Image (tube, rainbow, N blue to C red):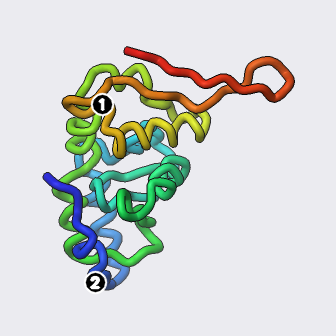
Amino acid sequence: LTPLSASDRNKRSSAGGKLAEEAFLHKLSEVPGNAHCADCCSASRVTWASVTFGVVLCAECVGGHRSLGTHISEPLSLRMDSWTDDMRDHMMARGNDAANREYEALASHRDYKPKADDCVDQKHAYIRAKYVDRCFSKGGSGTLQLPATRVGGAGRTAPQQINA
């Protein structure tokens, strides 16, 4: 499966009213892996999606997708934004498990994948490595440059790199 193209994402319409929207959200939640965020596995506040990658996201990880730019990932609210039939079909055909099989194909992703309670900077670094740099896809580096972390009390930072 390929990401949804920009031209398909731009054909917005309001398809079908509140009942159709609720039916879509219920079906989408039943797609394998969609009960939690594709990037940090949080089960709370999974109210966003990247239409481009066909994944559902939590409120913190969607910020990482926004920072990538809409030319890479187009995040939409599951409830507040308008969805085209093509967008809905793409989301139903893809889902978190299918996307993660592609973007987390290397076992080393487990060493870096953030948990729901990890800091936002760590989540956003992982999202960039996963979708832009494709570090954990087949042929990827299998490593991640983590954001700088505080050392000592004087506001100094030290970059971290972990090689799997």
For residue 92, what is the image quadrant? Answer: bottom left
- Disc 2 crowd, CA 10 A, few/some/many (<14, 14-19, 20+): few
Q: Amino acid at mark 2?
A: Gly
Most distant residue in the top direction? 164
Tell me residue 41's x, y (percent): 42, 37
Classify mark 2: helix, strand or loop: loop
- Disc 1 crowd, CA 10 A, few/some/many (<14, 14-19, 20+): many
Quadrant holding the C terminus:
top left
Between disc 1 and disc 2, whose residue precedes? 2
Identify the residue shown where x is 30% and y is 59%: 52
Work out whether residue 44 or residue 161 is closer to the camera in this orientation and state it.
Answer: 161
Label annotation for residue 136 = 1
Give left or right: position of 101 versus 116.
left
Q: Which residue is mark 2?
A: 16
Identify the residue shown where x is 27% and y is 81%: 11
Tell me residue 42's x, y (percent): 47, 40
Tell me residue 99's x, y (percent): 24, 44
Most distant residue in the left direction? 1
Distance between mark 1 and mark 2 Cα atoms: 38 Å
